Amino acid sequence: MKLFSSVLLLASLADRTNAAKKSASSGKKDPLANRNTDREVCQKFKDGKLSHESKNTACKCMAAFKKEMDQETGEKKCTGESTKLFTSKKLAVTGETIAEALLKRSNTPNGQSLCAVATGEGREVDCSGARMDGKRAKKIVAPSKTKKLTFENNHLDALHPQWFEGLPELKGLNIKNNFIQKLNPHLFKNNPNLEELDLSQNQILKLDKSAVFKKNRNIKTLKLNNNRIIEMKMKILTALPNLEHLNIGHNRIARINGKMLKTAGNLNFFDASFNNIASISTQAFKNSGNVETVYLQNNNIGSLNKQVFSGLVGCKFMNLANNVIETLHKETFRPMVSLRKLDLSGNKISDIANGQFKKLPSLKDINLSGNKIAYLPESTFDGSDALEFVYLKDNLITSFEPELFKKAINLKIFMADNNNIVEVGGDLLAGKTNLKTVSLSGNGLTHVDNLFGDEAAGLQNVYLQDNQIDSIDAQFLQAQPGVKNIEVQDNDLSEDELTFVKSVIDTNLDLEQIDLRNNNFADSTFGRQWARGDFGRLQGFINNYWDEVAAENSL
């Protein structure tokens, strides 16, 4: 048995010797060939800094370093920067700045397969779109002073800790659009200064290793969107107290738990859209007072606890569109005093409570389109005096309370297309001097009064197409000299109801078009889209019609 073992040992040694000779005779040397050997690494992180610690003269440097003579001790230490990449014409082109290097790459034959390397103070390596797989990528030995490293748009299916271990000054790392499925928990342990990390558009399935970002407390921007993440350990994000921008959208996450953002007190931007999120913990945003933007659209959220957003006092933009929300607690958005834009479109909301969006003094834009709302209480927007844009399209609304927008004096855009509206009172939009666009198409209107009085002097667009309108007040839009577009096609207007057209043409020098197609005109001449150059002809046709009517009445 011992003799047999000795034979195997001798055979193994012979194989290694022959392999070494073959490698030496080829004259080729993989710059990272020693990464996976058992030789001791000379450097270690101590007190947040990388330093030469080993006493063993045979120890190896991390790939980004080289040994140089220490003037004080006379010993060789791994304190020099490896700049082999600067002279490797098969791998890279160089320039003082990254802009110079990228320009040189674009002018180099087959340059798209090379990395662009900035050799100046702002060390940067850009290997984006270089058609790299893992075998070729490991030959890219970034210098130890590299501040930014980019492998975007390549064919990497795995990342190895050795690729980044010697880059203590690295601040930006971009590995977007590759085929990464897993993250080694020690991947970034030697990159304490990392601030921006982009791992988006890969195939990551889980983030179940709590230590993966444990040494990266300085990360401010983390992009994990467009992966396949179904699980994310709570401690993944609690290790990042300086996080400002987090994008986990377009994944398969099912829940936002209460401790996910617990330590992210500096968070400003949060995107978890296009996931499978069905519930949000009441504690999820408890410490998120600095968050300004929250994207939760296209999930499976069915309800919102009244306290779920209580910590979002600084939030300005919230998108909850295309979920399955059926009811809203009247206090759900009450703490969000900084909210400017709220999108709740594409849900299943049927009831709006009294004062639902009350006391949101900064709210300018609200979208409730695509729900099942039949009625809006008069107090819906009380205290939301800054309101400028209101979208209520594709609901079940039949009428509006006259004072719904009583205090919304800054209203600019009002759209309520495709409802069941049969009447709009003249008081609804009264006093709205900043009004620009009103759209009520696709409803059941039969008559239109002068909706705007003498105050909506800035009105530009009026869309009333696809109703059942057979009469329009003669004074309609007469006091709005800035109107540009009037669309009343697909209604039941007759020649007798075109008095408003002549008045509008006479008083509106900015008018660009009136659409009268598909109405109930006896003379098809009227049923067309009239542009400014044809207004004279249109007025002539109207005058001729009235003359004919007058002549018939005189008989």
Image (cartoon, rainbow, N blue to C red):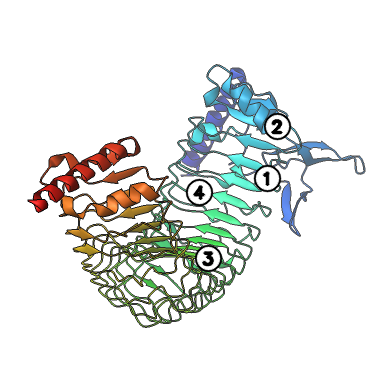
Dot label at residue 97: 2
Discs 2/3, front: 3
Q: Point out the tag, 4 or 1, that comes first from the N-terminus.
A: 1
Asked if disc 4 and disc 1 are in contact, CB closer than 8 Å, the reply is: no
Circle 3: residue type: Lys
| Mark pair 2, 3: CA separation | 38 Å
The residue where tag 4 is placed is 199
Discs 2/4, front: 2
> Residue 364: x and y, percent?
48, 65
| Mark pair 3, 4: CA separation | 27 Å
Circle 1: residue type: Leu
- Secondary element type, mark 1: loop
Asked if disc 2 and disc 4 are in contact, CB closer than 8 Å, the reply is: no
Q: Point out the tag, 3 or 1, that comes first from the N-terminus.
A: 1
- Secondary element type, mark 4: loop
Q: Point out the tag, 2 or 4, that comes first from the N-terminus.
A: 2
Q: Residue at x 21, y 64 (%)?
A: 447
Discs 3/4, front: 3
Q: Point out the tag, 3 or 4, that comes first from the N-terminus.
A: 4
**Would you say 392 lies left or right of 466 here?**
right
Q: Point out the tag, 2 or 1, that comes first from the N-terminus.
A: 2
Q: Residue at x 82, y 36 (%)?
A: 68
State whether residue 398 is above or below residue 484: below
Circle 2: residue type: Thr
**Dot 1 alpha-carbon crowd within 10 angstroms: few under 14, some 14 to 19, many 20 or more:** many
- Secondary element type, mark 3: loop
The residue where tag 3 is placed is 316
Dot label at residue 167: 1
